[in-house]
């Protein structure tokens, strides 16, 4: 290993000498791949309209992004973490232990989660209860908790199409999965009484019992992104995929969306709260970097400005449901109010 | 061998057997040979089939990215909107945003349609303006800032058509799909057809694909490979500059000077193992060592290049040692015999003769590094980067993308137009790899000597 070690030492020495002298002049962002398209739209517009260079936006997942944010303060750490779920106490603790004390929480809007099937297939009108019956490992049938017997949708409810059940749901590492579990599966579990039955049967954690999905190949976890889900639906016309609203809106010629509880998902129905399956999107800003990295404060203000994040802005046009309380967020960003304790 | 003699002796003992009259065992052997040939042929056929399938899918998806649809538009740069103070002061002009420019384009499209008598049914002014890419206001803003004296004039621009319109002329979007698509309507496509007949809209070679930076998800038509090609080129420069001298020095020492003992055996085994280590491992090493420990910037070509150097070194060392070994000892002996020192013998005689082999190994190592994505994932190079890195050496520390990473990025985007872009980027990457491999073969053909 002599030669390799020597080489590594030489590389280290040369890079350490040159690396020290570089100062960063662009904003660095990492995190959720759901927020990535919005962040890149804003970054692009920011680069076009300001003298500052275009921010660099990395993806890699919400959790990974928050961890990177909490790595410490300094130019080789990121400034902003995009996140499709709220920051966790463990992240805040990690941040604090690395000297990252002040973080701003910026809510940029809401993202809808839709259920879509092949464009030429039948129309679906789902309820959360249908989804729980279709995918849960144990369902309530004739008052008994039994292993999921359903093979096609019309066995669950007669007015659903007579089509084989096959669902492509986001893998457990996705933030989307959390929302799917919480707002569809668990909600459905309570709706159709399975939760009661689990409780009566002495389940330790009713939510966990509800969330256990069947493993006979009917529910397929997709660990990739929505393009993979789309390819799966394309290859298997019976399949129903779980997508983000903006992804669906870009592919309305290939997939058709099912209603949930009778509500068609759209920017409007999500904004009004009628469509139940949605979640807020956030980004987290490291306050210690605000006056150090040029353009960071401007980027944050630009992101939540009415022109960008408002209902007529480019983000809404791409499928983000704009936040009715945007003015409050703008105020907060201006005064750089750090987030308080989690409630 | 035994079979032949056995056959022969058996044949001698029986009557009615000759070369013309094929015996049972001969027939078996012939059949076995035939089977083997068929299997070989089938293996080759499967290989060719896979290659043709792959190439066909990439080419059919990607070739269209080398053409792009443009719309010629005369835009009146309204001073009332752009320069309210009327002083053309640069700091005032700086405040013009793309949001103030967008209405100018909308008016210009409407004027153009009115003048040509194209007032199409079912297309409102907003939809007509949507034929033009979202990149257009940015282009106009750059022009205005560069030429403030042109405010108040009517300037003719060649603007990108939006992704769906571009897709229509490439066969990706059809009237049927447009009827279902919320981003485009069949009426808009009819209007685009009319514009094409009038010569306002045309397809031309897409130079911007090679020079423009990446674009956001709303503008697939503006996305290009400029930053990625530059980033890849920077990385290859550093990889070559580091791995070739280090690799060659290590190989010469190991091959010519190092004593043959347990330690050198150990080193040899380790180098061979290192060549087989999955590339993602080098990414983890790079993150821990170069970014977290040394503190190099994220997403920078220098970090990518250092990681790829570590990955390329074993390949180069193995190739170089093989090339040095292939030089006959008589050359060394002759040089030493007439009084050359060991170093002179190596540098004056052995190394030049081994050079073609070394360079071939280096180029193949580089080609491998050029197509590598996995280690770059971990060091922040899979990112949306729109700024070109500066000229080297400072540019080595600026954020940049790389070609394979750009492919990966584009395949994840929601707009189907990015599939075309990704395939186009694969074609560009394949061409680079092909050229590099061709150079390697050429070097070998031209300079290699056989003894």
Image: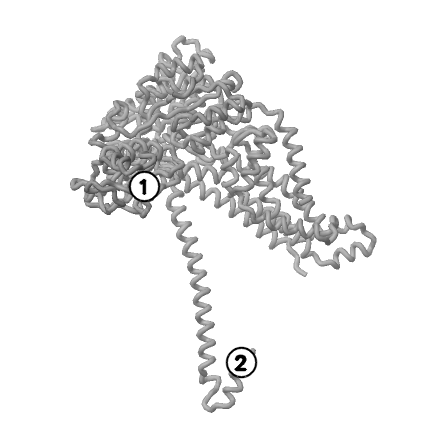
| Frontmost residue, B345 versus A299 | A299
Residue A258 can be seen, yes or no:
no
Residue, far right:
B339
Above or below, comparing residue A134 to residue B93 in the picture: below
Query: Closest to the observer: B450 or A109?
Result: A109
Q: Chain ID for label 1?
A: A
Quick one: label 2, few (<14), some, or many (20+) residues within 10 Å?
few
Instruction: Specify the label residue B6 is tagged with.
Output: none
Q: Is residue B151 visible?
A: yes
Q: In which quarter of the image is residue A195?
A: top left
Location of the C terminus of chain A (image quadrant): top left
Tell me if B199 is positioned left or right of A106 in this view.
Answer: left
The local secondary structure at tag 2 comes to helix
Coordinates of residue B393 in the picture (x, y in percent):
61, 30
Classify residue A181 by image quadrant. Answer: top left
Callout 2: chain: B
Q: Which residue position holds label 1?
A: A213
Q: Tell me the element at label 1.
A: loop
Q: Position of residue A252 (x, y in %)?
A: 27, 35
In x, y percent, where is residue B128? 28, 27
Q: Which residue is disc 2 drawn over?
A: B4
Neighbor class of circle 1 (other Cα within 10 Å; few <14, some 14-19, many 20+) is many
Location of residue B98 in the rendering, given as x and y in whole percent from the top left corner: 38, 20
Q: In this view, does B273 lie to the left or right of B35?
A: right
Quadrant containing the N terminus of chain A is top right
| Gap between marks 1 and 2 measured at Cα | 66 Å
């Amino acid at each position: 290993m002599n030669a390799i070690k020597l080489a590594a030492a030489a590389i280290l020495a040369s890079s350490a000498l040159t690396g020290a002298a570089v100062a960063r002049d662009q904003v660095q962002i990492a995190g959720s791949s759901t927020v990535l398209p919005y962040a890149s739209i804003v970054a692009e517009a920011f680069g076009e309209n300001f003298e500052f260079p275009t921010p660099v936006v990395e993806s890699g997942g919400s959790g990974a992004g928050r961890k990177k944010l909490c790595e410490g303060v300094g130019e080789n750490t990121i400034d902003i973490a995009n996140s499709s779920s709220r920051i966790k106490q463990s992240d805040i603790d990690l941040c604090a232990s690395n000297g990252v004390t002040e973080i701003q929480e910026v809510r940029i809007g809401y993202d809808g989660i839709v259920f879509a099937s092949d464009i030429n297939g039948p129309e679906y009108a789902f309820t959360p209860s249908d989804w729980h019956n279709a995918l849960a490992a144990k369902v309530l049938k004739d008052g008994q908790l039994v292993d999921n017997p359903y093979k096609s949708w019309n066995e669950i409810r007669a007015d659903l199409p007579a089509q084989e059940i096959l669902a492509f749901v986001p893998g457990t590492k996705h933030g989307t999965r959390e929302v799917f579990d919480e707002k569809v599966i668990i909600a459905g579990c309570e709706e159709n009484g399975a939760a009661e039955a689990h409780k009566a049967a002495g389940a330790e954690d009713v939510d966990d019992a509800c969330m256990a999905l069947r493993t006979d190949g009917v529910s397929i976890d997709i660990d990739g992104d929505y393009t993979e889900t789309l390819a799966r639906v394309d290859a298997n016309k019976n399949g129903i995929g779980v997508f983000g609203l903006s992804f669906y809106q870009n592919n309305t010629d290939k997939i058709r969306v099912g209603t949930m509880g009778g509500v068609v998902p759209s920017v409007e129905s999500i904004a009004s709260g009628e469509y139940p399956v949605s979640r807020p999107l956030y980004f987290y800003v490291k306050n210690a970097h605000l006056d150090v990295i040029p353009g960071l404060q401007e980027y944050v203000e630009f992101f939540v400005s009415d022109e960008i994040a408002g209902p007529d802005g480019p983000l809404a046009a791409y499928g983000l449901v704009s936040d009715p309380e945007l003015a409050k967020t703008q105020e907060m960003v201006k005064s750089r109010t750090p987030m308080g304790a989690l409630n | 061998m035994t079979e032949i003699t056995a056959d022969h002796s058996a044949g001698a003992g029986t009557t009615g057997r000759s070369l013309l009259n094929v015996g049972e065992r001969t027939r078996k052997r012939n059949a076995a040979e035939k089977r083997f040939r068929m299997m070989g042929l089938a293996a080759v056929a499967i290989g060719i089939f896979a290659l043709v399938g792959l190439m066909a899918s990439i080419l059919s998806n990607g070739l269209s990215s080398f053409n792009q649809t443009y719309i010629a538009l005369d835009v009146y740069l309204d001073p009332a909107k752009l320069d309210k103070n009327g002083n053309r002061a640069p700091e005032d002009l700086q405040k013009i945003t793309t949001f103030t420019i967008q209405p100018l384009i909308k008016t210009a499209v409407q004027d153009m349609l009115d003048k040509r008598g194209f007032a199409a049914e079912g297309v409102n002014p907003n939809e007509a303006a949507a034929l033009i890419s979202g990149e257009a206001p940015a282009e106009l803003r750059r022009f205005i800032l560069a030429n403030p004296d042109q405010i108040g004039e009517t300037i003719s621009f060649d603007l990108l058509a939006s992704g769906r319109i571009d897709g229509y002329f490439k066969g990706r979007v059809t009237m049927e799909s447009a009827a279902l698509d919320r981003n485009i309507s069949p009426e808009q496509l009819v209007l685009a057809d009319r514009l094409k007949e009038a010569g306002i809209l045309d397809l031309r070679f897409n130079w911007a694909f090679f020079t423009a930076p990446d674009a956001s998800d709303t503008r697939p038509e503006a996305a290009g490979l400029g930053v990625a090609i530059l980033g890849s080129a920077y990385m290859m420069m550093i990889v070559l500059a580091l791995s070739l001298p280090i690799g060659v020095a290590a190989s010469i020492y190991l091959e010519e000077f190092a004593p043959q003992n347990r330690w050198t055996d150990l080193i040899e085994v380790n180098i061979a193992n290192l060549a087989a280590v999955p590339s993602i491992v080098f990414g983890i090493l790079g993150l821990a060592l170069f970014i977290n420990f040394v503190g190099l910037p994220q997403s920078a070509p220098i970090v990518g290049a250092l990681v790829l150097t570590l990955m390329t070194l074993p390949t180069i060392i193995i190739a170089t040692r093989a090339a040095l070994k292939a030089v006959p000892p008589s050359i060394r002996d002759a040089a030493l015999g007439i009084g050359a020192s060991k170093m002179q013998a190596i540098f004056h005689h052995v190394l030049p003769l081994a050079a073609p082999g070394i360079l071939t190994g280096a180029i193949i190592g580089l080609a491998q590094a050029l197509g590598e994505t996995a280690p770059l994932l971990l060091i922040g190079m899979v990112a949306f980067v729109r700024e070109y890195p500066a000229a080297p050496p400072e540019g080595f520390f600026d954020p940049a993308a790389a070609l394979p990473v750009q492919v990966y990025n584009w395949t994840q985007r929601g707009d189907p137009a990015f599939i075309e872009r990704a395939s186009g980027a694969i074609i560009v990457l394949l061409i680079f790899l092909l050229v590099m491999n061709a150079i390697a073969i050429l070097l070998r053909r031209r300079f290699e000597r056989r003894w």
